[in-house]
């Protein structure tokens, strides 16, 4: 299927590793000119050197907790590509490395989590929406997380729930401008950093890494964890003109974790 993405222009925040890098790889393969954003320009350069396809990969630096840094990054991308058609808000520290239960959660973690994830997403949207409005087309995809749908991780759950609310709110405001806004909820996903992140969680729970990964994978209907390229394939569809009928929605890309029926 031709997604109609050739020569579209994208920004992927948190694009130097994990799900973000997989999304950037998929977009470049579809012919999208893709800016790979990281707080480290060196990591962004390393990531883009590994991306090949008809699309161009551009390394850029942005600190999502700094509005001026975000604005400067978008200006750079606009100068290089001539505009922005697609924004994938993926940038944030992945949860799990610090305990988030009531007895251990800290104010600093909550505030940092919201500053980076929620306000970072909002800042990126503020910077690109005027460009999208002017051209009458835009796709915004917010990478949230399954913790929005289950209790336990206080900071991750709260920030991802806030992203869901922002997604629906922006969709309602921007739809008539030709801009769709959607979110996806990954669950624990196979990336190059999975084992190092899950080792810390397993240690806190007093089990081996293998036992912990087996338990997590056992929660899915597939019986295995979803991979980053599988997430990226769906995000590419959301980024395309073909996804116009979907906006303000949240899609769980978990491999079938949630047993709750959402009508």
Image (tube, rainbow, N blue to C red):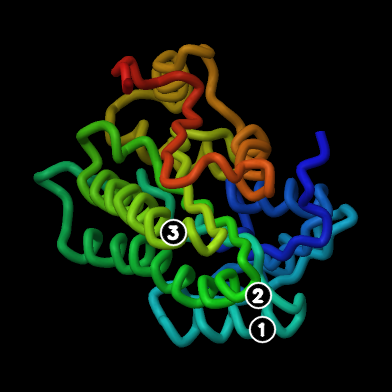
> Marks 2/1: CA distance?
8 Å
Q: Tell me if I can see residue 51 in this picture.
A: no
The residue carrying pointer 3 sits among few (fewer than 14), some (14 to 19) or many (20 or more) residues within 10 Å by Cα, namely: many
Density class for disc 1 (Cα within 10 Å; few <14, some 14-19, many ≥20) is some
Disc 3 from disc 2: Cα separation: 16 Å
Q: Are marks 2 and 1 in contact (CB under 8 Å)?
A: yes
- Which residue is more in the foreground, 198 or 262? 262
Gap between marks 3 and 1 measured at Cα:
21 Å
Q: Which residue is identified by label 3? A: 92
* Quarter of the rendering occupied by the N terminus: top right
Residue pictured at 56% horizontal, 44% vertical: 193
Image x and y of residue 215, in percent: 40, 17
Residue 143, percent from left and from top: 47, 49
Q: Which mark is in front, 3 or 1? A: 1
Q: Residue at x 59, y 48 (%)?
A: 18
Q: Which disc number belongs to residue 60?
A: 2
Label 2 CA crowd tier, 10 Å (few <14, some 14–19, many 20+): many
Nearest-to-viewer mark from 2 and 1 = 1
Q: Quadrant of residue 3?
A: top right
Q: Is residue 246 left or right of residue 34?
A: left
Q: Which residue is mark 1?
A: 76
């Amino acid at each position: 299927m031709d997604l109609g993405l050739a020569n579209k222009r994208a920004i992927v925040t948190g694009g130097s590793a994990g799900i973000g890098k997989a999304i950037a790889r998929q977009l470049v393969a579809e012919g999208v000119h893709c800016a790979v954003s990281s707080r480290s320009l060196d990591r962004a350069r390393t990531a883009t050197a590994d991306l090949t396809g008809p699309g161009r990969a551009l390394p850029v630096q942005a600190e999502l907790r700094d509005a001026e840094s975000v604005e400067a990054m978008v200006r750079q991308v606009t100068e290089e590509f001539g505009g922005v058609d697609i924004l994938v808000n993926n940038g944030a520290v992945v949860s799990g490395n610090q305990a988030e239960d009531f007895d251990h959660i800290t104010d600093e973690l909550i505030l940092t989590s919201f500053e980076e994830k929620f306000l970072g997403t909002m800042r990126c949207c503020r910077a690109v929406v005027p460009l999208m409005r002017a051209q009458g087309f835009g796709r915004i995809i917010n990478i949230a997380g399954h913790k929005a749908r289950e209790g336990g991780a206080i900071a991750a759950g709260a920030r991802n729930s806030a992203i869901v609310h922002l997604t629906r709110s922006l969709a309602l405001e921007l739809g008539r401008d030709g801009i769709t806004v959607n979110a996806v909820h990954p669950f624990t996903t196979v990336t190059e950093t999975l084992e190092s992140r899950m080792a810390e969680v397993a240690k806190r729970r007093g089990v081996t890494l293998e036992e912990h990964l087996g338990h997590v994978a056992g929660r899915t209907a597939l019986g295995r964890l979803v991979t980053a390229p599988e997430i990226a394939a769906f995000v590419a569809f959301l980024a395309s003109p073909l996804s116009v009928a979907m906006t303000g929605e949240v899609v769980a890309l978990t491999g079938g974790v949630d047993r709750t029926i959402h009508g």
